[in-house]
Image: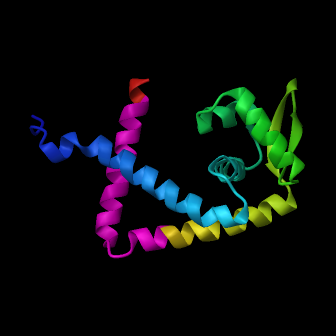
């Protein structure tokens, strides 16, 4: 038998959205002096975490933007020499995206700024609280993915 939702439970989705939005805004503000927009830093992080094997289409899906918009973004990042497009074996039309040496240096700076922000935001919470929060959110993500 599941517990009856309380008002706090009913507001959980809204709170998750507001926390994620505020966190992104804080990171935006800290990365703006480096000349980075949210689209740029997010694309660079996603490319970095993919290990150099993400396609333009997959990047567009992860960023939740259209392919024409991601192509323009990739063009800018390539012009700035942060990424390169590499041919995909077995598919002449597809290209995988990888960071260049300057892109990797920039990612190190982005990760440092993001790490500092994360430390500030999580300060004051116990390891048990953070572990429980992470576990609950990971389980919720699994349930959401199962609905698709």
In magenta segment, residue 134: yes
**Residue 113, image x, y percentages:** 60, 69
**Residue 121, image x, y percentages:** 42, 68
At 75% from the left and 64% from the top, the residue drawn is 106
Q: Quadrant of the N terminus?
A: top left
**Residue 146, image x, y percentages:** 40, 28
Q: Which residues are magenta?
A: 118-145
Front position in the image: 6 or 38: 38
At 17% from the left and 47% from the top, the residue drawn is 8
In magenta segment, residue 17: no
Relative to 70, 142 lies left or right:
left
Q: As displayed, is residue 92 above or below residue 64?
A: above
Q: Is residue 20 visible?
A: yes
Front position in the image: 51 or 117: 117
Q: As displayed, is residue 122 above or below residue 70?
A: below
At 68% from the left and 66% from the top, the residue drawn is 33
Q: Quadrant of the C terminus?
A: top left
Q: Looking at the magenta stretch, what is its main secondary structure?
A: helix
At 69% from the left and 69% from the top, the residue drawn is 109
Relative to 105, 22 lies left or right:
left
Q: Is residue 91 visible?
A: no
**Residue 96, image x, y percentages:** 81, 38
Front position in the image: 19 or 132: 19
Front position in the image: 148 or 75: 75
Quadrant of the rendered structure where residue 144 is?
A: top left
């Amino acid at each position: 038998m599941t517990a009856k939702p309380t008002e706090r439970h009913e507001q959980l989705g809204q709170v998750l959205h507001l926390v994620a939005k505020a966190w992104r805004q804080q990171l935006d503000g800290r990365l703006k002096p480096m000349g980075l927009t949210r689209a740029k830093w997010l694309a660079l992080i996603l490319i970095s975490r993919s290990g150099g094997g993400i396609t333009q289409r997959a990047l567009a899906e992860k960023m939740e933007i259209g392919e024409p918009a991601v192509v323009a973004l990739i063009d800018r990042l390539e012009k700035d020499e942060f990424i390169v497009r590499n041919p995909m074996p077995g598919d002449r039309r597809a290209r995988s995206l990888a960071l260049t040496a300057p892109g990797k240096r920039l990612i190190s700076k982005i990760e440092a700024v993001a790490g500092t922000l994360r430390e500030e935001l999580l300060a004051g919470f116990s390891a048990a609280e953070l572990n429980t929060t992470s576990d609950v959110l990971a389980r919720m993500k699994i349930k959401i993915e199962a609905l698709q």
